[in-house]
Each structure stands twice: as structure tokens, then as C-alpha cells.
Amino acid sequence: MNPAEWLIRTARLTPAAPALLAGNTVKADYACFAARVARIAGALTSDYKICKGDRVAVFMSNSTEYLEVIYSIWFTGAVVVPINAKLHAKEAAWIIENAGAEIAFVSTDVEDALSEFAPECLKTIICTESSDYVKLRESAAMPRPMVSASTARVKRSQNSW
């Protein structure tokens, strides 16, 4: 099962329930969170050609956008490459290169450092505090999460019994 399905189910069952909080401030309910994720996923697939199995790096400090990004990547069927924001940018670049990630989501505290050490495979760095990220949130939504490759294998093997 694609983990983004959990978000979609929760958004259907309790759309007005608080989902993303910063301290005591509700940043989004489940309906809003799921809609943002679907729109970011839509932009990843249409604008950046991300598809099932691609790797997308996440080199960010904790924030509500971190969850939006991770669920959006899962929504596309791609693989999240989480990188601890406390690592040196050189170490993050090594992880990105070895994963073969072409896109990295970053927070402002690591953006400049990663840009300095970015490997050749990394084509795009998207800062979640930039207008580029806001545009992702405003894109056309992807209709539903992709079925993950492992789920497809399980379904085929179950059907063959």
C-alpha cells in the first residue's frame, strides 16, 4: 500500500480534524493537507517528470512542509531519500549522488550549502520557503496516489493463487 493512501483515507473520514500543527497553531486540517499533497504531487509528475521508483531527496529541518513533501513524493510512487538536516552539506550531497536523486527539497538553513556541494545528478533544488514551492501547492492535483511497485507485486502474486 502506498502510505499516501493513509492520508487520503483520513482526509475522507475526518476532513476538518487538525493535521499539521506548528506549536499550538493549526496550519492545515486533513482536507487541506491532502489537497496540498495532491497538488504538489501533480506538479512533481507534470513539471519535473517524477514517476514511480524515482528518488527525491529531502534535506530539511522539521516543519509542516516536511510532511507535505514526503507525502507528495509517496503520492507519485517515488522513493523518499530522507537526509538528516544536521549533516554537513557535503555528506548530504554524497547521499543524493548515491541515491541518484535529481530533485531535492530543502529548507533555507541548508539551501546555500547544498547548492555549493550539489552533485551532477541533482538537477533541481526546491526550497520550501520559496515562491517555487508556493507554485507547487497551486498546481493541478494528481487524482490519486500511484500504486507502489511492491503493492503491485503482491496483488499479482495473490491473483495467481
Image: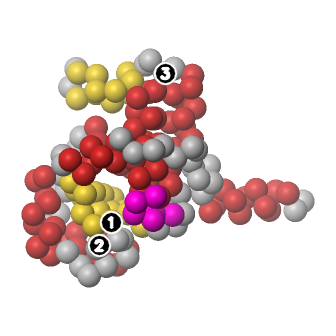
Whether 26 is drawn above or below 106: the answer is above
Q: Quadrant of residue 9?
A: top right
The amino acid at mark 1 is Ile
- Which residue is drawn at the image coordinates 37% and 76% (left, top)? 100
> Does residue 148 show up?
yes
Which span of residues is magenta-colored?
Answer: 46-51
- Please tell me whether residue 49 belongs to the stretch shown in magenta: yes
Q: Please tell me how crowded label 2 is: few (under 14), some (14-19), or many (20+) other residues with Cα within 10 Å.
A: few
| Colour pattern of the rendering | secondary structure
* Residue at the extreme bottom: 120
Foreground pick, 61 / 49: 49
Q: Main secondary structure of the magenta part?
A: loop
Q: Mark 2 near mark 1, Cβ–Cβ under 8 Å?
A: yes
Question: Which of the marked residues, 3 or 2, is nearer the chain's N terminus?
Answer: 3
- Which residue is drawn at the image coordinates 22% and 69% (left, top)? 92
Whether 16 is drawn above or below 77: the answer is above
